[in-house]
Image: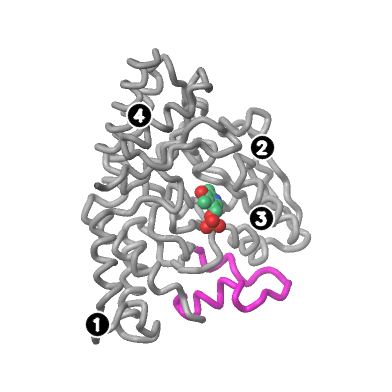
Amino acid sequence: MKSHNFYAGPAILPQEVLVEASSSALRYEDGLSIMEMSHRSKPLAAVFEEAERLIGELLDVPDDYKVLFLTGGASSQFYMVPMNILGANQTAGYVDTGAWSTKAIKEAKMFGNVNVLASSKDANFNYIPKDYEVPSDIRYLHLTSNNTIFGTQIQDFGNPSARLVCDMSSDIFSRRIDVSKFDIIYAGAQKNLGPSGVTLCIVKKDILGKVERTIPTMLNYETHIGKDSMFNTPPTFPVYVCLLTLRWLVKNGGVAGMEKRNQAKADLLYGEIDRNPLFKGTAVAEDRSKMNVCFELIDDSKNEAFLAAAAEANCIGLKGHRSVGGFRASIYNALDIESVQVLVNLMQNFEKKHG
Ligand SMILES: *Cc1c(COP(=O)(O)O)cnc(C)c1O
């Protein structure tokens, strides 16, 4: 029996993607596993081309941007972004909305000046700061669209005057976005796109080549742009699994289809959290994430009992991050609403027993 997978990442993938990936892991073309084939071979070139094309179509990526498949996780983008676009005497603005933003800030300080424009640290990151000024002279403004650990999400990017750089690791392809508002978007694949091992970057080309420092070849976006993500051996199998997920996205209504599906799942789960007298949400209501739903038992002495009941119902990965406690249900694109219903039933049964 398949479990209901609520892990935050690596996370659930569509069942049909896993079936096809398994078959290609054994035999793809010429009697070989896809993992045994050269990245220079025609079939692999076709995989990369189609993946790049589908990302362009799904997100409506303008022509002056490049879609890249890199390695080192979103965490490597924390330093690659400032290394490539922040001059030593320039200042970047950062909004600190949780652990990942904090890490991005730490790295950026190694390359230039960092102005932390706002932070929600004062309330353990349970909200998204909104009323802050964006200075006109910053090189870029860095945002984290969805805070995987704390369960908050930027609902509206507005129209800031600054160039935007955004870590979209945990909500890319979950809703419609206007790529043209951003100069760099990056995302580790393992939340909403594919397996771990590959990082998606969408880079506006004309912002590059403007800093004076020497950038190591592998850390320079221009290297990877010039070689279509094939300067060195790319993570071929992870990119292939991403391609299968992208095809699944297209078949299921694209990002607009996902947005609808994700809204329905979030409504169902938050509806129960707000109704059930035993539970409460941890994030401020207007900033609640549609990807990572953080909640807790008002009586936390019952935590172990709830996790045990969850395990019995085959609900996996619900334990909250240690910095928040309680529970976190990650309800990414690939999770069916039926799984959310199982969790809601579980919460209702728990109320009957312990309420
Ligand atoms: C998971 C996550 C990261 C870290 O990604 P890695 O690929 O493990 O480096 C960064 N930012 C956000 C928002 C995440 O959810």
Q: CA distance from mark 3 to mark 1?
A: 47 Å
Way the structure is coloured: one colour
Earlier residue among tags 2 and 4: 2
Q: Residue at x 54, y 61 (%)?
A: 73
Earlier residue among tags 2 and 1: 1
Q: Is residue 351 above or below residue 325?
A: above
Query: Answer yes or no: do the residues labelled 3 and 1 have beta carbons within 8 Å?
Result: no
Earlier residue among tags 3 and 1: 1
Crowd band around label 2 with a 10 angstrom C-alpha radius: few (<14), some (14–19), many (20+): some
Left or right of residue 101: residue 190: left
Crowd band around label 3 with a 10 angstrom C-alpha radius: few (<14), some (14–19), many (20+): some
Q: Check disc 2 and report the residue beneath it.
A: 118
Query: Answer yes or no: do the residues labelled 2 and 1 have beta carbons within 8 Å?
Result: no
Earlier residue among tags 4 and 1: 1
Left or right of residue 181: residue 259: left
Q: Residue at x 38, y 85 (%)?
A: 38
Q: CA distance from mark 2 to mark 4?
A: 30 Å
The magenta-colored residue range is 203-230
Q: Check disc 4 and report the residue beneath it.
A: 269
Q: Residue at x 27, y 72 (%)?
A: 24
Q: Residue at x 40, y 62 (%)?
A: 62
Earlier residue among tags 4 and 3: 3
